[in-house]
Amino acid sequence: MNCSQAPGFILLGLSRDPEKWQLLFCILLALYLLGLSGNLLLLLAIGADVHLHTPMYFFLSQLSLVDLCFITTTAPKILQTLWTGDGSISFSGCLTQLYFFALFADMDNLLLAVMAIDRYAAICHPLLYPLLMTPHRCGVLVSGSWGVAHCVSLTHTLLLSQLYFHTNQMIPHFFCDFGPLLLLSCSDAHLNEGLMMALAGVFGISALLCIVSSYGCIFYAVARVPSAQGKRKALATCSSHLSVVLLFYSTVFTTYLKPPSSSYSSGEVVAAVVYTLVTPTLNPFIYSLRNKDVKSSLRRILNMVKSPD
């Protein structure tokens, strides 16, 4: 079988047992629809309520937008595979899915870091907060994140596009990811793999260090607050963000804290389901269930829908 730079692939999905496909389809469809509705509702609540037009909720709306796109990158293909039993995908389709998957995953990573900076400014420098987090600076932070995420994901995709593969190889995954593709390459991928690991390491560790250092300063500032009520109030604004950070990084590390060309286990595929589908679905509910402002805005919207007059 000859190597080619434009092969087709077959995604094996989550299970090779056809008897499980219908159940998996129903579960993933429900999860996808829940993720779409949850993120759309949160975007609507933030956009419709002028009281939520603040830096914290602006960044949260961006996170919801990214999560909305993130789940749409992988969910439709796995649902189509489970419904038809056909997991075939072209090389160009695979690279396109790979680019958008990396773009939105990188944006999640960067936005979590930006939101940590926002919480640091709000808690450690409350008097200067309006001057530090102006609308212009918030826009620069978000647009800069999009630019960096685009460059990083495009570089990863271009490095992978230079490799050769056998035609109709089976990918032991439910979407096109870097690791399985590097494992299947019939080219010498050591240089490409090394460059991708170095770029992902610098990018990922920088964002994580930003989050850790921000929360280090936050916890130090909170520890100096004299009243217990003041401490609880300060930490309450961070609890949702911390929950999302822990959920996101714990599953990502399970999958990617190793050389990309290592073989994939079933546990890592499950972890991939969590960070590509479960986490983006849970994010809006984590923020809305713990946030009085968002809950009151959602109640007003629901009341308007029930009684439009």
Image (cartoon, rainbow, N blue to C red):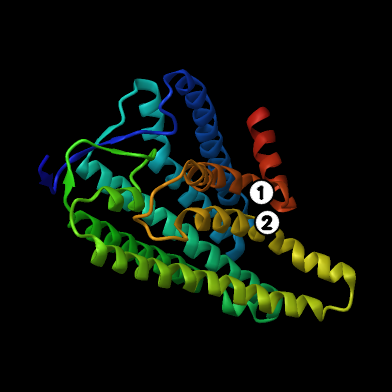
Above or below, 166 relative to 80 = below
Counting from the top left corner in percent of width and height, residue 211 is at 58, 70
The residues bearing labels 1 and 2 have C-alpha atoms spaced at a distance of 6 Å
Q: Quadrant of the C terminus?
A: top right
Count of numbered circles in the view = 2
Q: Residue at x 54, y 74 (%)?
A: 209
Q: Which residue is mark 1?
A: 286
Q: Amino acid at mark 1?
A: Ile
Does residue 107 appear left or right of residue 35 in this picture? left
Above or below, 187 relative to 289 = below
Q: Amino acid at mark 2?
A: Ser
Counting from the top left corner in percent of width and height, residue 78 is at 40, 33
Q: Residue at x 33, y 53 (%)?
A: 178
Q: Which residue is the extreme one toward the left?
A: 2
Counting from the top left corner in percent of width and height, residue 265 is at 46, 44
- Looking at the rendered structure, the secondary structure element under dot 1 is helix
Q: Which mark is residue 240?
A: 2
Upstream in sequence: badge 1 or badge 2: 2
Residue in front for this viewpoint, 169 or 116: 169
